Image (spheres, rainbow, N blue to C red):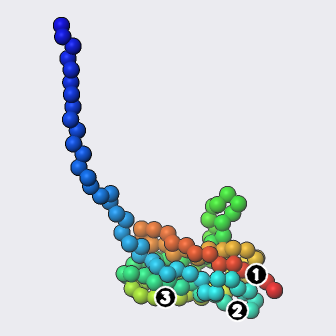
Amino acid sequence: MKPFLFTAFLTFTCCSLPSRPPPLVTSLRFTPSAFDPFKRNVELRYSIDREAVVSAYVIKKDSAGHRLVVKTLFEYAEITEGSHAHAWLGGNDAGFFVPTGVYYGVIQTSDDLYETSVEIYHD
């Protein structure tokens, strides 16, 4: 019996990988990037490319990197296209000023999370 020789020819077609849609939230930042809440407030600013249901939080990350909500700015709001700003007075949901450290502003949409940082200090 003769050995059977099988030769396969594979054809690869070049194609592009699926692209991720452009981000819904852009220009996310705190202004100013560091502040003393006993002297001034800070604003969480961002632009949104189309109307969406959005939630905004201020969080702190623990040593393991887990996100802990410090302040809920708003939840499930219908936000229109354009630029927006929301003030944060430097307090938590219980109404007390938070200690010094780095905090994060998080914008949550149905598709993604966007975050930026701010540093709190006390003179």
Q: Which residue is mark 3?
A: 84
Location of residue 35 with respect to 103 vertically, above or below: below
Disc 2 residue type? Arg
In the rendered view, does 29 fall on the left or right side of 121? left
In the rendered view, does 25 fall on the left or right side of 66? left
Mark 2 or mark 3, earlier in chain: 2
Disc 3 residue type? His
Q: Which residue is mark 2?
A: 40
Q: Secondary structure at mark 2?
A: loop
> Which residue is situated farthest in the left direction here?
1
Where residue 63 sits, quadrant-wise, is bottom right
The residue sitting at 21% across, 35% down in the picture is 9
Q: Secondary structure at mark 1?
A: loop
Percent x, y for residue 117? Answer: 62, 75
Q: Secondary structure at mark 3?
A: strand
CA distance for labels 2 and 1: 11 Å
Q: Is residue 93 visible?
A: no
Q: Residue 121 got which mark?
A: 1
Density class for disc 2 (Cα within 10 Å; few <14, some 14-19, many ≥20) is few
Q: Is residue 37 visible?
A: yes
Density class for disc 1 (Cα within 10 Å; few <14, some 14-19, many ≥20) is some
Is 47 or 51 nearer to us in this picture? 47
CA distance for labels 1 and 3: 25 Å
Disc 1 residue type? Tyr
Is 114 or 88 nearer to us in this picture? 114
In the rendered view, does 20 fall on the left or right side of 64? left
